[in-house]
Amino acid sequence: MARRQRTSAFEDLMSIAGMLPWWLSLLLALVSYLILHSIATRPLTLTSTGPNQLFEAFFKGMIPTMCTFGQIVIPFIFGLGGVISWLKSGKDGQRFG
């Protein structure tokens, strides 16, 4: 029985994007950028924070930070997957059909 090799989230997302049609991968790259960019550039509004509101302030600050990183990485993965899918379709003679 073969053991399943552990892969990273990057590799998993890249393999999914490579299996999709190239135009869908590029569309997902654009949509993911637009959604994550709108969240990352949203102004951060924190109310007065006391000791009991520390976790709320932490998570309100983490979401835009993660989206700032994600707006670059996730569209890159989908774009690269789209290019791979486009190259695969050229081998099958279906690139322009």
Image (cartoon, rainbow, N blue to C red):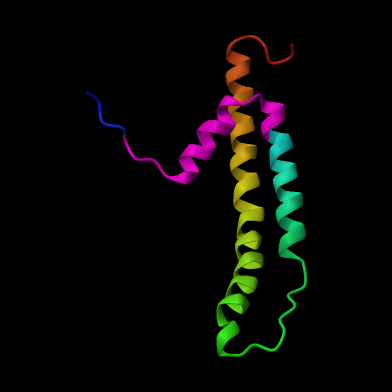
Image position of 26 with respect to 41: above or below: above
As drawn, which residue projects farthest toward the front? Answer: 52
Image position of 65 with respect to 25: above or below: below
**For the N terminus, which image quadrant?**
top left
Of 71 and 55, which appears nearest the observer?
Answer: 55
Which region is colored magenta? 5-25
* Residue plotted at (57% across, 25% down): 19
- The image shows residue 13 at horizontal and vertical percentages of 53, 39
Which SS type dominates the magenta stretch?
A: helix
- The image shows residue 39 at horizontal and vertical percentages of 73, 61
Q: Is residue 68 magenta?
A: no
* Residue plotted at (49% across, 44% down): 10
As drawn, which residue projects farthest toward the left? Answer: 1
Of 38 and 78, which appears nearest the observer?
Answer: 38
* Residue plotted at (39% across, 40% down): 7
* Residue plotted at (70% across, 46% down): 32
Q: Is residue 24 magenta?
A: yes
**For the C terminus, which image quadrant?**
top right
Residue 79 in the figure: left or right of residue 9? right
Q: Quadrant of residue 89?
A: top right
Image position of 69 with respect to 1: above or below: below
Image position of 1 with respect to 78: above or below: above
Q: Quadrant of residue 52?
A: bottom right
- The image shows residue 5 at horizontal and vertical percentages of 31, 35
- The image shows residue 83 at horizontal and vertical percentages of 63, 31
